[in-house]
Amino acid sequence: MLRSIRAEIPADAAGFPLGLPFLRSLGELAVSPTVTLLAGPNGSGKSTLLEALALECGFPAIGHAAPSRDSTLHGVGPLARALRLSWSTRTRHGFFLRAEDVFGFILSIRRQREELDAELGAAKVRLEGSSEYARRLGLGPLRASMAALEARYGKNPDARSHGETFLHLFRERLTPGGLYLMDEPEAALAPESQLALVALMSDAVAAGSQFVVATHSPLLLAIPGATLYDFDDDQVRPSGWDDLASVQLWKGVMEAPARYLRHVWSPPEPGT
């Protein structure tokens, strides 16, 4: 289990990522043995910290190469090297999940299937008139690869919605006792699917897993018993759900949407 995170930042650090303001108040961030939630506005540093943590832990992002060869993580390398992680028991099981990676992964599965289809078609033409034994030797590995792809992702991955694919990929990769890092998973999920994600997380926690999640979702931020940090005003502070600015905003919008929308929505005049 990961117990805490701190960063050793030079006093004269400037620029991205070591000069990010939130690092000055990070101190030693205690990590919950179950779920730690990172809240705060865009640009506050939540995602950067998660990316650096994934790189330092050696966890791959879904749909990408090993962390050391993942170009999307190269920019946070200096912060990853500055992180000092405290473990009760070090785990090698885990992954880094970003909503945008799931969309890219769907495309990569589609490409793999198209390429296998093309290879199978070409092999059938090439082996036309050959003996049954030669056909089995030539087509067998390609058919086995296609069967394995379909067994894991279905015969038509596009038939699933993005949310369904997200939950499927998440469920298939969970291992008991793992550490799972997620950056704004709600981007791919409707509210009911967010509830399904919380249920999967609950089962995983019961099996000894641990989560660190950056999110704007009031629903995910309300996970019972989670440790919650607010990345706001260039600081990192423990927070309660009701104290978060985003939660207060959503409460106000749900109670009186017109009061908020009239300041930002100006419909065209009739006839224009």
Image: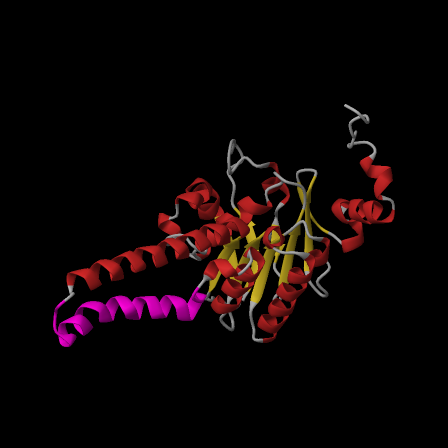
Residue 256 in the figure: left or right of residue 105? right
- The quadrant in which the C terminus is found is top right
Residue 107, x across and y down, in percent:
43, 52
Residue 241, x across and y down, in percent:
76, 55
Q: Residue at horizontal 50%, vertical 63%?
A: 169
Residue 32 appears anywhere in the view: no
Q: Residue furthest top?
A: 272
Residue 82 in the figure: left or right of residue 198? left
Task: Depth check: give the residue in front, 221 or 146.
Answer: 146
Residue 193, x across and y down, in percent:
64, 61
Q: Which secondary structure dominates the residues rendered in magenta?
A: helix
Task: Depth check: give the residue in front, 144 or 234.
Answer: 144
Task: Depth check: give the residue in front, 60 or 76.
Answer: 60
Residue 47 appears anywhere in the view: yes
- The quadrant in which the N terminus is found is bottom right
* Colouring method of the image: secondary structure
For the record, the magenta segment spans 129-155
- Residue 212 magenta-highlighted: no
